[in-house]
Amino acid sequence: MAIREFQQLIEAIYFAKDSGRGVESTFMWFVEEVGELAQALRSGTVEQLEEEFADVAAWLATLASLKGIDLETAVRKYASGCPKCHATPCACAEPAPQP
C-alpha cells in the first residue's frame, strides 16, 4: 500500500472522529501511541512491535490529514538522500557529545 493510499484509508475510517476531537487531543493520542511503541521496543514481541508501529503510523496519518498535509508529498524531502548532505547513507558529521 502506498503512503497516500494508507492516509486515505485512515481518513475514511477515522477522519470524522478525529476532526471532532481536534488536533491537540489527536496529538495527545499520537504521543500515547509513541509511548506504547517505546515499551514494545524495550521488551515487545515482533507482533507487538508491528501493532505499535501500525498505530503510530495511523495517528501520524490522521494528524497530517487534520492539517491538510499529504504525507506522500511530505516524505519526498528524503527522495535525494539526507536533506542536509544529500548522501545515501547520510555522511553528516555526528554532533559532539554534550557534557
Image (cartoon, rainbow, N blue to C red):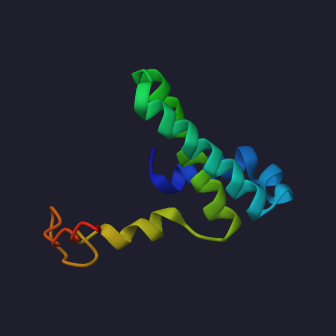
The image shows residue 86 at horizontal and vertical percentages of 19, 75
Give the quadrant of the C terminus: bottom left
- Quick check: 37 above or below 23? above
Is residue 83 left or right of 10 when viewed as pictured?
left
- Quick check: 82 above or below 39? below
Given residues 99 and 93, the one toward you in this image is 99
How many discs mark residues in the rendered view? 0
Outermost residue toward the front? 99
Q: Residue at x 53, y 35 (%)?
A: 52
Q: Quadrant of residue 84?
A: bottom left
Is residue 68 left or right of 73 when viewed as pictured?
right
Q: Residue at x 19, y 68 (%)?
A: 94
The image shows residue 8 at horizontal and vertical percentages of 61, 53
Given residues 72 and 32, the one toward you in this image is 32
Given residues 53 and 75, the one toward you in this image is 53
- Quick check: 90 above or below 61? below
